[in-house]
Image: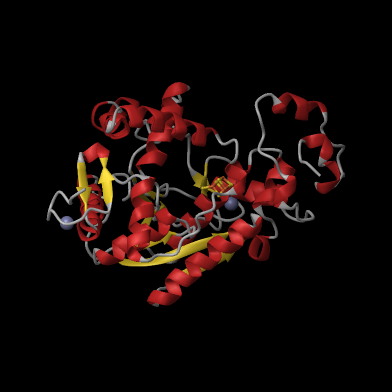
Amino acid sequence: MKCAVCRGPAVIDLRRHNANFCADHFLKFCRDQVVRAIDEYDMIEPGERVLVAVSGGKDSLALWDLLLELGYEVEGMTIGLGIGDYSTASTEAAIAFAARRNLTLGRIDLRGDYDYDIPTAAAVTRRVPCSSCGLSKRHLIDRAALDGDYDVVATGHNLDDEAAVLFGNVLHWHTEYLGRQRPVLAERIGPEHDTRSGGAEAGTRVFPRKVKPLVRLTERETAAYCVLRGIDYVVEECPMAEGNRHLRYKEALNAVEAASPGAKQAFYFGFLARAADRFAPEPDGGDGEVRSCARCGSPTTGEVCAFCRLIDQVTGHDPVPVELVRPRRRGSRRRRARTKRPSGQSATGAQNSTGFAT
Ligand code: Q46
Ligand code: ZN
Ligand code: ZN
């Protein structure tokens, strides 16, 4: 197996590109793919300050490394989710990466800073863990970017992630999500006449621009990138992802890709080129009037934003260990509805009857 560029010994074969690469040319390939994504979708301008959302996994650490290699000014932000050993190892990997390179890494710990964690939030809300997790991460990263005056937030979503999300949205024809599934989400400026206290001043940024520079790389490629660059990342998957629909969509797409290399890429980039515009949201966002959350000042269409409502609901409960929270399976909504715990009962006290194992 020879490198397609230098004919030296290859270390990886990329069937979708019908090419093999040596280590040096594979690393160059990764950088080129990121440059192409950034240029093609106008993700980051030279000189802009970038905040990378760092989980400690292969994608976010590869992203941080790649952006630094490409000369961007990048700092990291990691959130301790409280998902048992997985979160401990993830935070450690992020800290070690930053320390070894003398980089700035902002840190938030949900339990220490906000008095909840993801397993407890899942138990109390009786929703899949990824629901409160995604909401928390989005809110806190957005907030950190605005408070820290970063121009743009970069996340490690790769081609497999984006194709799986697209697959799910097409399967269920979630047209409103299809309209927002892009490698760049534009920043949003606050309403001109925001009279609420604590809110952003009229005309200032209320959502930072968000970009996904890894959309041209698969997770196999980001893993190989980390190995070749000597980046220690958390290999273990989040234990709360078990039963996650996106994992099944990834498996389905991998089966298609194995039979037809390049199918995943054609599916996702074909959508962006030929279909995404057809699902574009209304110019006003179609979400109704955006106002400032009465509690934290973040933009919301209601009185209080979703994050503050989550905080109200999930803080002050005894921590629920990750082992006691099982992903919801099909049909469990109905079973849970019949076993709703009496008001006043603690979150942990209702574990058996609400689908959380003991
Ligand atoms: S959303 Fe869900 Fe991830 Fe949060 S609960 Fe785990 S799998 S970490 S990207
Ligand atoms: Zn080579
Ligand atoms: Zn709020």
Q: Is residue 234 visible?
A: yes
Compared with residue 281, is residue 98 higher up or lower down, i.e. above or below?
A: below
The image shows a total of numbered marks equal to 0
The answer to which image quadrant residue 166 occupies is top left
Does 232 sit above or below residue 250?
Answer: below
Percent x, y for residue 250? Answer: 44, 35
Q: Quadrant of ligand 2?
A: bottom left
On screen, residue 33 versus residue 60, left or right, reads: left
Q: Residue furthest left?
A: 6
* Residue at the image point whose x is 16% and y is 57% from the top: 8
Q: Give the percent coordinates (x, y) of residue 208.
A: 39, 53
Residue drawn at (62%, 45%), measured in percent from left and top? 240
Q: Nearer the viewer, residue 326 or 15?
A: 15
- Colour scheme in the image? secondary structure
Q: Is residue 100 above or below residue 85?
A: below
Query: For this rendering, which residue is in front, 48 or 203?
Result: 48
Q: Quadrant of residue 75?
A: bottom left
Q: Nearer the viewer, residue 304 or 70?
A: 70
User: x, y percentage for residue 91?
Assistant: 54, 64
Question: Which residue is rendered at x = 28% and y = 32% of the image?
Answer: 261
Please give the name of the residue rendered at 69% of the width and 56% of the height, measured from the top-left corner: 116
- Is residue 312 visible from the viewing direction of this image? no
Where is residue 310 shown, x and y percent of the image? 65, 47
Q: In the image, 34: left or right of 108? A: left
Rendered image quadrant of residue 306? top right
User: Which of the image's four quarters has the C terminus?
Assistant: top right
